């Protein structure tokens, strides 16, 4: 799998380095094994009173070159940065597009407790399982104890000690986000790639959960930061 967050819409300064998006996307398709996934964490700037739509354009390009858009997930920030009021609501999320090369091979779904897990129902519940004509089937079952987590994942940004290690980078994502994706889409021994690894969060998380990792970054400064974070785990 690949897990990465590109430098979108020039919202951050990356020492003057450029971002050849189409070249990177094509190479990701070439190297991804059948059944593998690419997790692409991105968002949009607001320029001239309009959101750019860059994230959607990138998602459509991934589809154009052969990837499936397996899921459109949301990274919701518990502590978003307050923004100047510009007649719009405060931005609290980023997209986490899940692209797959063919049918997804590995999925270890994260499960959460059901609010009414184990409850014996006095009446009936109705579930819609139809694919064509909309109809409902009558079911009388106890409520399951667990269910698969939804595709909106919430994380605190930059507050935890493990995330403070990455403060030398302008835009790291939370370690918990990396862990959840790595555990979801890979098994022990699988290869995890981050082609824009920055502070090394993806690589560090892959190492902690016994995955092989490959981190690439054009900035030697960021590579050194990533190496230091991984070395701490190895002690």
Image (cartoon, helix red, strand yellow):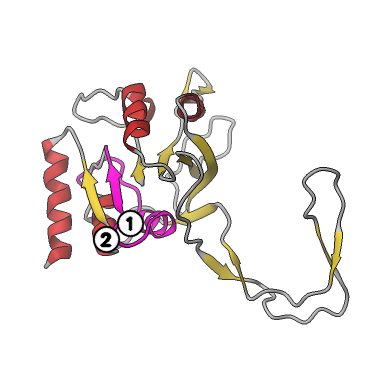
Q: Magenta segment, which residues?
A: 168-195
Residue 49 visible somewhere in the drawing: yes
Front residue of this view, candidates 86 and 48: 48
Q: Helix or strand or loop: what does disc 2 sit on? A: helix
Looking at the image, how many numbered discs can be counted on the residues?
2
Residue 109, percent across and down?
51, 61
Residue 199 visible somewhere in the drawing: no
Q: Which badge, 1 or 2, comes first in the chain's sequence?
A: 2
Residue 152, percent across and down?
55, 52
Which residue in the rendered view is the most extreme toward the top?
48
Few, some or many residues within 10 Å of mark 1 (<14, 14–19, 20+)? many
Residue 181, percent across and down?
41, 54
**What residue is at 45 percent from the left and 47 percent from the top?**
80
Q: Which residue is tagged 1?
A: 175
Q: Which residue is tagged 2?
A: 162
Contact (Cβ within 8 Å) of mark 1 with mark 2: yes
Position of residue 175 in the picture relative to residue 67 (left or right): left
**What residue is at 17 percent from the left and 57 percent from the top?**
230
Position of residue 179 in the picture relative to residue 56 (left or right): left
Few, some or many residues within 10 Å of mark 2 (<14, 14–19, 20+)? few
Residue 204 inside the magenta-drawn segment: no
Position of residue 90 in the picture relative to residue 19 (left or right): right
Front residue of this view, candidates 19 and 49: 19
Residue 174 inside the magenta-drawn segment: yes
Work out whether 199 lies above or below 9. Answer: below
- Using the numbered discs, state the Cα–Cα distance from disc 1 to disc 2 in whole angstroms: 7 Å
Q: Quadrant of the C terminus?
A: bottom left
**What residue is at 18 percent from the left and 28 percent from the top?**
15
Work out whether 59 lies above or below 105. Answer: above
Which residue in the rendered view is the most extreme toward the front?
34
Residue 219, percent across and down?
15, 34
**What residue is at 45 percent from the left and 39 percent from the top?**
101
């Amino acid at each position: 799998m690949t897990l990465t967050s590109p430098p979108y819409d020039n919202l951050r300064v990356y020492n003057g380095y450029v971002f050849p998006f189409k070249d990177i996307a094509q190479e990701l398709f070439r190297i991804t094994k059948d059944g593998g996934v690419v997790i692409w964490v991105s968002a949009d700037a607001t320029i001239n009173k309009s959101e750019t739509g860059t994230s959607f354009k990138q998602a459509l390009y991934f589809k154009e070159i052969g990837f499936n858009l397996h899921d459109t997930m949301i990274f919701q920030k518990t502590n978003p940065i307050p923004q100047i009021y510009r007649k719009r609501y405060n931005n609290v999320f980023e997209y986490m597009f899940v692209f797959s090369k063919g049918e997804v091979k590995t999925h270890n779904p994260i499960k959460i407790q059901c609010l009414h897990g184990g409850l014996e129902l006095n009446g009936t519940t109705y579930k819609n399982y139809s694919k064509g004509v909309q109809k409902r089937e009558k079911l009388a079952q106890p409520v399951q104890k667990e269910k698969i987590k939804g595709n909106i994942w919430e994380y605190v940004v930059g507050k935890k000690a493990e995330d403070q290690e990455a403060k030398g980078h302008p835009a790291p994502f939370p370690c918990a986000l990396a862990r959840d994706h790595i555990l979801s889409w890979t098994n022990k021994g699988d290869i995890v790639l981050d082609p824009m690894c920055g502070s090394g969060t993806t690589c560090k998380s892959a190492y902690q959960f016994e995955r092989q990792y490959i981190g690439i970054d054009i900035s030697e400064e960021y590579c050194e930061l990533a190496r230091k974070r991984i070395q701490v785990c190895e002690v």
